[in-house]
Structure formats: C-alpha cells, structure tokens
Image: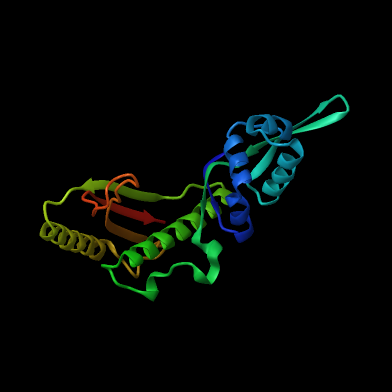
Amino acid sequence: MLDVAVIEEPAAAEASLDPIRSRILAALAEPGSAAMLAVRLGLPRQKVNYHLKELERHGLVELEVERRKGNVTERVYRATAGSYVISPSALGAISPDPARSPDQLSGYWLLALGSRLLQEVGALLTGAQRAKQRVATFGIDAQVRFASAADRAAFTEELAQAVTTLVGRYHDESAAGGRTHRVVVGLHQIPTTPTAPRQLPEISETEAGQEN
C-alpha cells in the first residue's frame, strides 16, 4: 500500500468523492471483504459490493486475497493507498495556471503555483511508482509571526533576494545531463479556525518546495 496515491483521471476522482466510496476507502486501511465492510459501515452487502467493484475498476482498491468458504468465494480487498490526492490535471483545461495571472502578491497566483506543484509532483510520483524508482524532492515548512506589515514586506524582499542569489549561483543552462528543477516559495497567513471570531489571521507560514 502506498502512503499517498495521486488521482489523475477525472472518473477516478469522481469515484473517490462519492460519500459511500470514500467511507469504504477509509475502512479498507485494513483489508476486508464486502461482507466485512457491510458490518463495519452498517450498509447492505450488495451495495458495498457494487461500490467495491467501481473502486477496483478505477484502481483505488485492489484484491488482496481470494479464498474459498464452502460454496462461496470470498474476495478480500484493500485500499491501494493510505490517503489520496486529486491532481488538478483531473480538471483538464480549467485547472489553475500561474501564467494566467502572474501577480506575485495575489493569493490566486499562489493557489495556481500550489496547483502546478501538486500536478507536477503527482506526475513524477506516478511515473516513479511504475518504474519502481524514488523521486528526489525537498521541502521546507516553517511558521513566522511578524510584528508588523513592514516586517513582513522586509522579510519577503530578503527571501526573494536570497532565492534569486542561490538560483543564479547554481543554475547551469549548458550542463550536460543536467536536470531542471522547479523551486516554489510561498508566504501566506494561516487561516483562523471556523469557530474563531472573524478577524484577519496573524500567524504566517513559509513554504518552500523543490521537485525533480
């Protein structure tokens, strides 16, 4: 079982979002048959069996073992991953694209960057899994609390300068056999919880990701 599986096909994404099927996927963190899942989830076995076949058809569950019990064959399934991520590629032409609104101060641009990051890393992981290889990646996740908007602006400027310096130092366009990597750095406020009073979030988070 994979830790995380990336869903790239629209039909598979639709199947995973069905409430009953998502419950089945969660329940199949431990292998089970349709009869076992029916008991766990309090659903009719026939309904569970139908949804299991659909999940199997889209590669979200897989047969672990098939065993004979008298005149009945029991099929035991397991989820193909502990959790799933839907790639923006499943949205096709309407998936976010940073090139459409390249405003570095826009939250929408940051979302588009994150969308592209998810899509590209997802494609890398899918290909690596098929080839039984590892993907070289790197990420930073940190939190910083600014005393003022001026401090935040100064931090952003210094961070941009530092990244620009590093990229200029190590980028080699003519390197034979070199591999192009993407570096993404984002800064955003951490949203308050839904139950908190309406106010602007005060804690900020810095994220950096690099993919091969």
Relative placement, left or right, of 198 versus 121 is: left
Q: Is residue 55 above or below residue 107?
A: above
At which x and y percent is residue 81?
A: 56, 42
**Quadrant holding the C terminus:** bottom left
**Quadrant holding the N terminus:** top right
Residue drawn at point x = 60 percent, y = 60 percent: 10
Relative placement, left or right, of 188 versus 47 is: left
Q: Residue 195 occupies which quadrant of the picture?
A: top left
Residue drawn at point x = 24 percent, y = 53 percent: 199
Q: Is residue 197 above or below residue 44?
A: below
Residue drawn at point x = 34 percent, y = 49 percent: 139
Relative placement, left or right, of 80 versus 63 is: left
Residue drawn at point x = 58 percent, y = 51 percent: 17
Which of 91/135 is in front? 91
Q: Residue 97 occupies which quadrant of the picture?
A: bottom left
At which x and y percent is residue 79?
A: 61, 40
**Residue situated furthest top in the rendering:** 70
At which x and y percent is residue 32?
A: 67, 32
At which x and y percent is residue 184?
A: 32, 59
Relative placement, left or right, of 174 versus 89 is: left
Q: Is residue 31 above or below residue 197?
A: above
